[in-house]
């Protein structure tokens, strides 16, 4: 299957999965390799034959959907965003909570767990010393059970830790090996749950939602707007929504305002 053939297949199939082709432009190599391997498993010669298979076999759509999930992640990705959360935005939220409260965060599309683990490390080492009475409750969701299994294992190639502050990395990943596991203390309060963001969301409300490099990159525009409308109801007034560094919110009203200048962090307004 050539690259143009794979592109044509994705352009045809993406809308039927409520996805958008443009989101896959830069990562299509990863997706196309997976589809090519699937064709080999099925003994199918080319993209046209696979399209015919999809039209004849409804179950194959679920397989293609799983092949289209892009899983690039690392700790402290977009470090400047986590810096402003630690230094400015989250302290303001925590200061407003009553003593003994629970701070609720949700990582949507958590992949193999780097993002929620980053939040857990940031909270315990960067915030809890200042707010010792606040407890973290962190929910992480993803549609892929295999990725969630890796998140539950909690062991990562050392290279994925390179952007995490070195002192934090040493404390949260004390194993000196090439694939250290996160220490048990930083797993406390984290719940991993299989959910597809296109169809369901966990019970809110949350003080912080990270929805990065999923909905506003890969979802079709009507679905993006639907997800954004539902996210409003899943954040407390004044709560924060973080999206990807190359993403933008679809059309929205006065319910959102920028919380950190040009950074991709938005606050749900108090209205």
Image: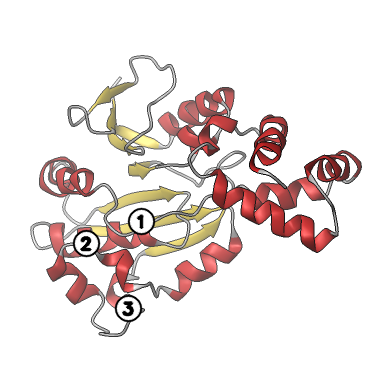
Q: Are marks 3 and 1 in contact (CB under 8 Å)?
A: no
Percent of width and height locating residue 167: 12, 70
Q: Secondary structure at mark 3?
A: helix
Percent of width and height locating residue 256: 32, 23
Give 198 or 45, whichever is nearer the viewer: 45
Position of 216 compared to 168: left or right? Answer: right
Residue at figure coordinates x 59%, y 38% from the top left: 198
Q: Which residue is mark 1?
A: 115
Q: Which residue is mark 2?
A: 164
Say whether disc 2 or disc 3 marks the residue closer to the N-terminus.
Answer: 2
The image shows a total of numbered marks equal to 3
Distance, label 3 to label 1, CA atoms, is 16 Å
Pick out the residue farthest to the left. 130
Q: Mark yes or no: residue 69 visible.
A: no
Q: Secondary structure at mark 1?
A: helix
Distance, label 1 to label 2, CA atoms, is 11 Å
Numbered badge on residue 184: 3
Residue 14 vs 176, above or below: the answer is: above
Say whether disc 1 or disc 2 marks the residue closer to the N-terminus.
Answer: 1
Distance, label 2 to label 3, CA atoms, is 18 Å
Task: Classify mark 3: residues with Cα within 10 Å, few (<14), some (14-19) or many (20+).
Answer: few
Pick out the residue farthest to the right. 56
Percent of width and height locating residue 193: 53, 58
Q: Quadrant of residue 138?
A: bottom left
Residue at figure coordinates x 24%, y 25% from the top left: 258
């Amino acid at each position: 299957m050539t690259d143009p053939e794979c592109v044509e297949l994705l352009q045809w199939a993406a809308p039927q999965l409520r996805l958008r082709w443009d989101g896959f432009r830069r990562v299509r190599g990863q997706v196309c390799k997976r589809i090519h391997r699937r064709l080999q498993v099925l003994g199918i010669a080319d993209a046209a034959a696979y399209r015919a298979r999809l039209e004849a076999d409804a179950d194959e759509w679920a397989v293609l959907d799983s092949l289209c999930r892009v899983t690039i992640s690392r700790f402290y990705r977009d470090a400047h965003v986590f810096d402003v959360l630690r230094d400015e935005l989250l302290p303001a939220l925590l200061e407003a909570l009553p003593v003994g409260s629970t701070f609720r965060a949700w990582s949507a599309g958590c992949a193999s767990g780097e993002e929620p683990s980053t939040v857990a490390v940031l909270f315990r080492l960067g915030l809890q010393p200042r707010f010792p009475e606040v407890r973290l409750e962190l929910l992480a969701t993803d549609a892929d059970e295999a990725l969630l299994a890796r998140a539950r294992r909690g062991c990562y190639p050392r290279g994925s830790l390179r952007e995490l502050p070195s002192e934090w990395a040493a404390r949260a990943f004390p194993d000196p090996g090439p694939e250290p596991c996160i220490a048990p203390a930083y797993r406390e309060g984290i719940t991993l749950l299989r959910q597809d963001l296109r169809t369901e969301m966990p019970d809110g409300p949350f003080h912080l939602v990270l929805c990065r490099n999923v909905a506003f990159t890969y979802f079709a525009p009507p679905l993006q707007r639907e997800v954004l409308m539902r996210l409003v109801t899943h954040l407390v007034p004044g709560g924060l929504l973080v999206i990807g560094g190359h993403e933008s919110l679809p059309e929205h009203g006065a319910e959102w305002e920028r919380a950190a200048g040009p950074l991709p962090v938005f606050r749900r307004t108090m209205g």
